[in-house]
Image (cartoon, rainbow, N blue to C red):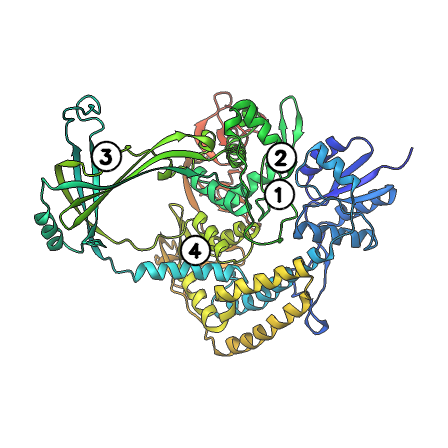
Amino acid sequence: MANKCLVVVESPSKAKTIGKFLGSKYKVVASVGHVRDLPKSRLGIDIENHFEPQYIPIRGKGDVIKAIKKEAKEAGKVYLATDPDREGEAIAWHIAHLLGIPQEEACRIQFNEITKSALQNAVKAPRPIDQKLVDAQQARRVLDRLVGYQISPLLWRKVRRGLSAGRVQSAALKIICDREKAIQSFVPREYWNITALLEKLPPGKGQKEAGPGKKGRSFSAKLVEYQGKKLTVGNKEEADRVLAAILPEAFIVEQVEKKERVRKPFPPFTTSSLQQDASNKLGFYTKKTMLIAQQLYEGVEIKGRGTIGLVTYIRTDSVRVSEEARAAAAGYIKENYSEKYVGNQVYSNKKGSVQDAHEAIRPSYVDLHPDDIKDSLTRDQYNLYKLIWSRFLASRMAPAVYDAVSADIRNGDYTFRASGSKLKFEGFLKVYSTGGEEDEEKHLLDLEKGEKLRLEEMLSEQNFTQPPSRFTEAALVKDLEEKNIGRPSTYAPIIATLIERKYVDREKKVLIPTELGFLVTGLMEKYFKEIADTGFTAGMEDRLDSVEVEHADWKGIVEDFYKILAEELAVADKEIERVQLPEVLTDQVCEICGKPMAVKHGRYGEFLACSGYPDCKNTKPLVSKIDVKCPRCGKDIVARKGRSGKLFYGCSGYPACNQVYWNKPVQKECPRCGALLVERKTKAGERACSNPECDYKE
């Protein structure tokens, strides 16, 4: 029997799904992400040798690499099936290097969705590794390493340990800080809205009553013009003058415009638009969206069908959809809704051919309705899959059609405007709602030119202009994409880093820069103008894209950037004085000397230290209570972080009491054995007994 073909992917769950489809002739193994990278302990870039990266096997990956080499040696053919993007191409390139696969060998297979047909087609059309994609990834990796490993130590020395700077991270932080400055400097401006509540006169001879009572006759019209020019009412005195000038019996319909209004569906999701919609509609943070989407892509166990990938590749800037997927969607829409719901929308990408090797994010099987597989998914998986499924199906449906009416109503020199609309054909709204005002119907006016109207009431309302809104994660993602800063696949880790570094606080879903964030941004603006400048960062993104599209010299791009960086580093190191951050005092008191404890930052994160240092050197962990009492001693259970950064829950009486839980305990005893129950992250979000010898669950 001929040797099996070896297929190497990144993820074990992806390997499981692919193995099911390819069958017994193939052995599928996972590299578990990257196998080679730049060393963590040093810069790892030979600046003198034209910025040559010094890659090494990643620590802890020795057994994985050894296993892949063993399987490759016994295989008849090796296929590298990593993700279809720059990062995936680079992982394949590193694996090929370790396995000694020649550069020209057709070993790379690519697919946009994990389905049987996509995989079978992929293994029939292997290609050599695309060096343009690899170089595009290397350029970004090397640039980010140069910025991070040379500016971050400077911040450690001048400000405090644990800080960092980044090519995209610093630009994103500046955007958040600039917005906060705009909010702080904002001066509200007063204005008044003047509205007339009007009523159609009762029908006269030959007129038809609109309905019982006043139904269909009353509506509101907003004051918009004076003597044909836009009118802004700035204060109460002006509002009172306008109200005094209005003649109650002189409201006449001057112009009526009736037309059909068409609302086209949105294109299918890209990475960025998925992050924004999941944030706005599901309340997901970007990091959570990407985590759940990755699970849907790599494969989920579906009752009756086994493990299948539910959506196409989730890192894409493209809105393109394959002909096969279009045909499948059209067939599904025709069968389930009717022919008139089938649309023929054409969507175009914002940026040429970059990252367009794969499609938009869509369901792998359009006939797999979210409700049909709800029982096999977690709540988050179901909600995100439903969002992706609905958005894609809607993108292939006909536009929604409204009957719309707009009327200008004169009263002397003043013009009031009223509008209304009614949904005539729901089209794509049958499956996908934008959740905004556009989805709401407004009373459809039945007015005729020259018609006189009766005034019910005049209303004047004081308002003030509002400052710019703080960024939510969705709004920041949208702004970064519009400014061409970074790539959508990097937005989630960038936002997570800003929060982790305490540069930004997330309060009620909005991002607020901290004093530390302002401080670091100030230093970056003064000493590293290009890195903090959004325009420069966007321009650099275009140059990096040229490596992928035009195979530009990536090392030349890095060299041009580093000349600027090296000069700025020398100046910054010389001029920046040691920054003394103010102490953050807590309400906890030092049990040794009685002074308040302060939050400090060390190698393993935050901890508490006596503000009386150096006279008192008392320190203790920074913990938070969770309103659960220790079953052993009755003291509070608190959340702690170990040296590895992993969260656990232990008794505040430690070391006298060493009660510990790895899952969050709740104040409820197990009805079987009396131990505390803990929360477990399962599909059902169940609670289980903390006693390992008891299997109670609820």
SS at badge 4: strand
- Disc 3 or disc 4, which is closer to the eye? 3
Crowding at dot 2, Cα within 10 Å, few <14 / some 14-19 / many 20+, comes out as: some
**Residue behind mark 1:** 359
Disc 3 + disc 1, Cβ < 8 Å: no
Please report the residue visible at 44 percent of the width from the left and 65 percent of the height from the top.
Answer: 521
Disc 3 + disc 2, Cβ < 8 Å: no
> Between marks 3 and 4, how big is the CA–CA gap?
53 Å
The three-letter code of the residue at mark 2 reads: Ala
The three-letter code of the residue at mark 3 reads: Leu
**Residue behind mark 2:** 325
First in residue order: circle 3 vs circle 1: 1
> Between marks 3 and 2, how big is the CA–CA gap?
46 Å
Position of 459 relative to 238 (above/below): above
First in residue order: circle 2 vs circle 4: 2
SS at badge 3: loop
- Disc 4 or disc 1, which is closer to the eye? 1
Q: Which mark is residue 447?
A: 3
**Residue behind mark 4:** 504
Disc 2 + disc 1, Cβ < 8 Å: yes
SS at badge 2: helix
Q: Which mark is residue 291?
A: none
Crowding at dot 4, Cα within 10 Å, few <14 / some 14-19 / many 20+, comes out as: many
Q: Nearer the viewer, residue 168 or 681?
A: 168
Position of 531 relative to 300 (above/below): below
The three-letter code of the residue at mark 1 reads: Glu
SS at badge 1: loop
Q: Is residue 238 left or right of residue 506?
A: left
- Disc 3 or disc 2, which is closer to the eye? 3
